[in-house]
Image (cartoon, rainbow, N blue to C red):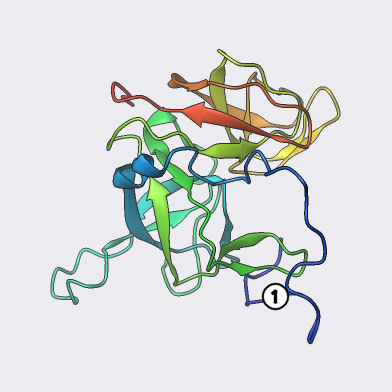
């Protein structure tokens, strides 16, 4: 995944080339219910390569200096496994994330930038909406690398790679089982898949009010 430098398609091209006769189910990072916006916080993206919508992130202190502008948060969000980003400096353990490290899902925004593949997200330094588990029962859509099963706990991928099944996961994605193989995942025991999803599609997860690390 490249930097989110603002690629918006072919210069002079159409904004939208096709129209479906039925509305889509959802896109990764989209909130299934508008009221869940109340469970989101604005946090700065620290990852040097940006972060795509719909990925699970960790929240890390980037400064202990309270003299900075109050408009600049002292925390930033990173993908699991990353130790530094741009000018942010070291941000704690890499690859050693636990359930307590999970800071939520980066929420899709219609004004997002996108990478050269058209994947929406925010570049480093941009402000992002993150649905926080501490705030309440957010219900975002996430991408299903493999088929996901309603009712199963959510597994947050902290180290990407090839699963025992052969499927390839990236850090920050989710599964409804422990993928094994070269993939490291943290079970979010109070988060659940509340819909099923096919491989390559989307499913809805929920981390309820009782969520605790």
Which residue sits at x=51%, y=59%?
Answer: 109
User: What is the x, y in percent for residue 181?
Assistant: 76, 25
Q: Is residue 105 left or right of residue 115?
A: left
Residue at point 65%, 21% (across, down): 196
- Expressed as whole percent of the image width and height from the top left, the position of residue 168 reads 79, 37
Can the viewer see residue 93?
no
Q: Report crowding for label 1: few under 14, some 14 to 19, many 20 or more residues within 10 A (C-alpha).
A: some
Q: Quadrant of residue 161?
A: top right
Residue that badge 1 annotates? 8
Name the residue located 60 percent from the left edge and 16 percent from the top edge.
Answer: 150
Query: In this rendering, is residue 192 above or below 121?
Result: above
- The total of numbered circles placed on residues is 1
Q: Secondary structure at mark 1?
A: loop
Q: Residue at x 55, y 46 (%)?
A: 29
| Residue 58 x/y as whole percent | 43, 46
Question: Which residue is the extreme one toward the left?
Answer: 67
Q: In the displayed image of the protein, which residue is found farthest to the top?
A: 151
Q: Is residue 145 left or right of residue 107?
A: right
Examine the rendered structure and indicate whether residue 88 appears above or below residue 27: below
Q: Quadrant of the N terminus?
A: bottom right
Is the residue 181 above or below the residue 64 in the image? above
Q: x, y percentage for residue 203?
A: 63, 30
């Amino acid at each position: 995944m490249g930097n989110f430098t603002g690629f918006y398609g072919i210069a002079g091209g159409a904004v939208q080339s096709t129209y479906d006769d039925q509305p889509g189910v959802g896109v990764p990072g989209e909130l299934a219910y508008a009221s869940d916006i109340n469970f989101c916080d604005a946090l700065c993206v620290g990852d040097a390569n940006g972060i795509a919508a719909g990925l699970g992130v960790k929240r890390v202190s980037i400064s202990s200096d309270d003299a900075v502008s109050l408009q600049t948060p002292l925390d930033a969000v990173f993908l699991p496994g990353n130790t530094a980003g741009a000018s942010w400096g070291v941000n704690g353990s890499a690859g050693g994330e636990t359930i307590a490290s999970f800071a939520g899902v980066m929420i899709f925004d219609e004004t997002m930038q996108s990478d050269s593949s058209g994947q929406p997200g925010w570049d480093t330094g941009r402000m992002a909406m993150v649905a926080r588990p501490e705030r309440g029962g957010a219900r975002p859509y996430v991408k299903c690398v493999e088929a996901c099963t309603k009712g199963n706990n959510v597994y947050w991928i902290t180290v990407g790679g090839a699963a025992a099944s052969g499927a390839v996961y990236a850090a920050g994605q989710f599964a409804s089982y422990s993928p094994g193989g070269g993939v490291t995942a943290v079970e979010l025991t109070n988060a659940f898949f509340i819909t099923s999803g096919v491989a390559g599609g989307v499913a809805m997860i929920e981390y309820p009010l009782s969520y605790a690390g």
